[in-house]
């Protein structure tokens, strides 16, 4: 397998844009950050209810919400959405993830 070139990833994204990736359109139209306050209230335990700050840092609430939207749009199970996020550049870009970023685990959905 050949090493990735400097522009390979940006060329792939340009190719997706040329084919009118619908996720780009959705990402432009939906104000995701407007959902953050409501998501934070239901997604995370308040600091007072937590026993300790130990453990892995939780996934971002908006990222998890966008993952659930992808799952609903493409009719994917939790295990399949985890696989597809790892596999598809369009899903990674929609979620704002890079190739080296942590992918939301299926058990967390």
Image (tube, rainbow, N blue to C red):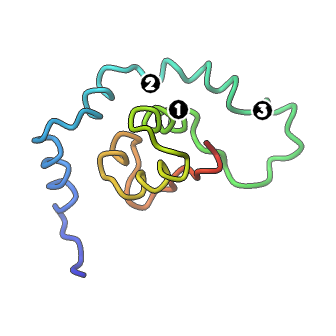
Q: Residue at x 12, y 41 (%)?
A: 19
User: Position of 94 compared to 80: left or right?
Assistant: left
State the mark number for residue 65.
Answer: 1
Q: How far apart are the two marked residues, 3 and 2, measured between alpha carbons?
A: 21 Å
Q: Work out which quarter of the rendered image holds the C terminus and state it.
A: top right
Label 3 vs label 1, nearer the camera: 1
The residue closer to the viewer here, 39 or 20, is 20
- Which structural element holds mark 1? helix
> As drawn, is 29 to the left or to the right of 19?
right
Tag 3 secondary structure: loop
Residue in the image at 25% along x and 27% along y = 25
| Pointers 3 and 1 in contact (C-beta within 8 Å) | no
The single residue placed furthest to the bottom in the displayed view is 1
- First in residue order: circle 1 vs circle 2: 2
**Mark 2 lies on residue:** 32
Q: Residues within 10 Å of mark 2 (few under 14, many from 20)?
A: few
Q: Quick one: SS at disc 2?
A: helix
Q: Residues within 10 Å of mark 3 (few under 14, many from 20)?
A: few
Residues under numbered marks 1 and 2 in contact, where contact means CB atoms less than 8 Å apart: yes
**Image quadrant occupied by the N terminus:** bottom left
Locate residue 82, reporting x and y percent: 50, 52
Rendering quarter of residue 51: top right
Residue 88 lies, with reference to residue 19, above or below; the image says below
- Mark found first going from the N terminus, 3 or 2: 2
Look at mark 3 in the image and give the residue it sits on.
Answer: 45
* Image height of 104 relative to 45, above or below: below
Whole-percent x, y for residue 40 in the image: 65, 27
- The Cα atoms of the two marked residues, 1 and 2, are separated by 9 Å
């Amino acid at each position: 397998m050949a090493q990735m070139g400097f522009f390979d990833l940006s060329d792939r994204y340009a190719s997706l844009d040329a084919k009118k990736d619908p996720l780009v359109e959705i990402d432009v139209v939906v104000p995701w950050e407007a959902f953050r306050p409501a998501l934070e209230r239901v997604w995370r335990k308040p600091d007072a209810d937590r026993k300790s700050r130990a453990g892995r840092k939780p996934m971002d609430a908006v990222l998890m919400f966008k993952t659930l939207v992808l799952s609903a749009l493409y009719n994917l199970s939790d295990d399949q959405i985890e696989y597809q996020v790892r596999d598809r550049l369009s899903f990674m870009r929609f979620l704002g993830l890079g190739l080296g970023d942590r992918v939301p685990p299926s058990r967390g959905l």
